[in-house]
Image (tube, rainbow, N blue to C red):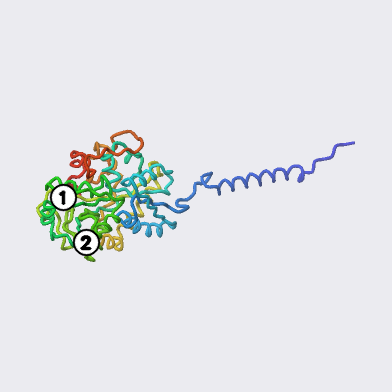
Amino acid sequence: MEPPVPHPVKNVLLPRLRFLCIAAACLLSAAAAPGALAQERWPARSITMVIPFPPGGGTDIIARTLAVRLQEKLGRPVVIENRPGAGGLIGTQQVAKAAPDGYTYVIGITNTFAINPAFYKSLPYDPVKDFQPISMLAIGPHVLVIHPDTPARNIREYIEYGKSQRGKLSYASYGNGSTAHLITEMLKEQHGLDFVHVPYKGIPPALADLMAGRVTLLVSSTAPAVPLIQAGRLRALAIYGDKRLESLPDVPTMAELGFKDTNLQIWYGLFAPAGTPQPIVERMNTELRAILGSREVQDIFVKAGILLRPPRWTTTQRSSRAKPNAGAALSGFPARRRTSRSTHTPAPPASRTSVPPQCAARRCVSSDRRN
C-alpha cells in the first residue's frame, strides 16, 4: 500500500500561516508595550513638580503659575507636591533619588542649591552631580517687613528701636540657613543689634506670626508679602534688591538709604534628576521659555515683585564647578558640595539664635553684583 500524499494546504501552508500569525502578533504586542520595541512618547502620564516648602510661599506661587500653563502645552497634568521640612532638604532629596524619566522635577532656590552646601556639614544630595538644570525661572528681591504697630517708620528708626530693646525683640525666618536668616544676621552684626532668631518651616507661618505680633521682623521673599503690605497688614521698611518694585513703588531699596552690600536676591530654577534624557530637557526648556515670555505671566510676576531672567542655566551650573563652596550663595550659582554624600547632619548651633559661624555668614550673604 502506497503512503498518503501530503495535502499541500493542510500540511504545508497552514503551519506556515500559523507561524506568521503568531510572529505578527508578537511584533504588534512588542510595539504596543511601553519601553519595548517602541519607546513611549513623552509625556505619556502626569508630571510631578516638587516644592520643598509649604504652600503660599514665593516658590509655591511661581510653581503653580507655571504648572497651569505647562500642562496646557504638554497635554498632561502637572501635579504640585509640597514637601517642606529641613530647610528644603526633604523635597530636594526626594527628586535627587527619583527616576530620571522626565516625570519628576523640583523647584530649586538659593537655599537648597547654594546655602545648604555651605551651611551643613553634609547633605543627602549633591546639588551639581545629582541634578540636571532645566531652566532658570526668576529672581526675587527680599523685603524687610515689621508689624504695623512697631514704633518705627523706616529702617533707621527701627535700628534705633532695636538698640533700645536689646534681647527683647525676635525675628522670623523660613529656616536655619535661609536667606532670611543670614541677611538678618548680617544686619544684626553691622549695627550691633541683639534679636532672637525664630525659624519656621516656610514663609507663610512666619508671616502669620509676624502679623499676630509674636515676632517683630522678617526679611521675606516678595511674592507672599506684597499683598499683605498693600493691605496694610505689614509695614515694609526697605527692599534688598537693585531697584524699587513696581508693586511697592514707595518702598526704597537699602542702597538708596545708604546701606552697602544689600543687593541680596533669591533665584528660582527648575531641576530634574541627573540623567534625564536630553530631548525631554530641551522640550521642557523650550516650553518654559515660551511661558516666561508671555505677557500674562510677566504681569503676574511683576505684581508679586518677582523679576524674570533669561533661562540659561546649563552654562550656570557648569560654571559652578569652578566655584568651591559655592562662593557667594546669593550669586545665582548652584553650589558644589564639600563632602561626600552621607546622612544629613546639621552644623552645631553657634548661639541661642542658631547663627552659623561668622565666616559662613559673611561668605553666604554677599552682594549679588552679577544680578
Tell which residue pokes out farthest to the top in this image.
340
Label 1: how many residues lie within 10 Å, few (<14), some (14-19) or many (20+)? many
Disc sitting over residue 234 in the figure? 2
Q: Which residue is mark 1?
A: 262
Residue type of the residue flagged with mark 1: Thr
The answer to which of marks 1 and 2 sits earlier in the sequence is 2
Residue pictured at 33% horizontal, 51% vertical: 53
Q: CA distance from mark 1 to mark 2?
A: 21 Å
Q: Is residue 71 above or below residue 22?
A: below
In x, y percent, where is residue 300?
Answer: 29, 62
Relative to the observer, which residue lies in front, 309 or 149? 149
Quadrant hosting residue 213: bottom left
- Left or right placement of residue 101 versus residue 209 in this view: right
- Left or right placement of residue 151 versus residue 121 in this view: left
Tell which residue pokes out farthest to the bottom in this image.
231
Comparing labels 1 and 2, the label whose residue is closer to the camera: 2
Q: Secondary structure under badge 2? A: loop
Residue type of the residue flagged with mark 2: Leu
Q: Quadrant of the N terminus?
A: top right
Residue pictured at 18% horizontal, 46% vertical: 185
Disc sitting over residue 215 in the figure? none
Q: Secondary structure under badge 1? A: loop
